[in-house]
Image (cartoon, rainbow, N blue to C red):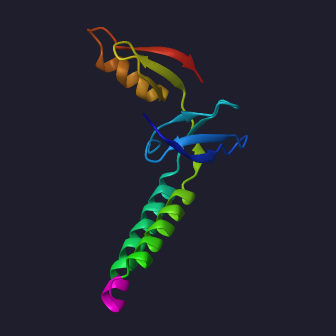
Amino acid sequence: MQLDIIQKSCPICQTKIKLGLMSINGEILRCPKCGQLLIDSPKRNLFGALMFAIGFLSIGGLRHFWGSNIIRDLAILVVAGILSVAVRKLTVTKKDLVIKNKQSGQVSFVDYSDWNEIVESSTGKENGFEIIEKL
């Protein structure tokens, strides 16, 4: 069961998309309203992780200089977590094909070059993927 507690908006049509806390990392989504393919921005994810790490380092530094204070440490941790989640944004990605794995039924988004590699690797044997849609 996935808890959809984070809402991000589509950069094209501003539709709110509910996401799980850690589920979107590297996953391509389709906007339910405009149909655009969306993915996390890697630079923003890195910046969010850096903000969270700075929060942990500041807790360590404050404990070293002024001793332990659980309320202060939790407040810093909560603020760092909220800021790191708030920084993450969805960006539009360009893919050419929607393919489906025949065995597992998993749907993936790929470029033509990736599709050509799949076809070349399956020469002489059955291709385990099929094209569902051209974007």
Q: Is residue 61 left or right of residue 86?
A: left
Q: Quadrant of residue 58?
A: bottom left
Q: Nearest the camera: 56 or 48?
A: 56
Residue situated furthest right in the rendering = 13
Count of numbered circles on the image: 0
Q: Position of residue 125 (x, y in %)?
A: 26, 9
Q: Is residue 89 magenta?
A: no
Q: Is residue 109 above or below residue 61?
A: above
Residue at (56% x, 17% y) in the render: 133
Residue at (47% x, 56% y) in the render: 45
Q: Is residue 83 left or right of residue 129?
A: right
Residue range highlighted in magenta:
61-68
Q: Nearest the camera: 111 or 3?
A: 3
Q: Quadrant of the C terminus?
A: top right
Q: Is residue 101 above or below residue 16?
A: above
Q: Is residue 71 above or below residue 4?
A: below
Q: Is residue 66 magenta?
A: yes
Residue situated furthest bottom in the rendering = 65
Q: Quadrant of residue 68?
A: bottom left
Q: Position of residue 83 (x, y in %)?
A: 53, 64
Q: Quadrant of the N terminus?
A: top left
Q: Is residue 21 left or right of residue 33?
A: left
Q: Magenta residues: mostly which secondary structure?
A: helix
Q: Is residue 89 left or right of residue 42?
A: right
Q: Nearest the camera: 18 or 124?
A: 18
Q: Nearest the camera: 67 or 43?
A: 67
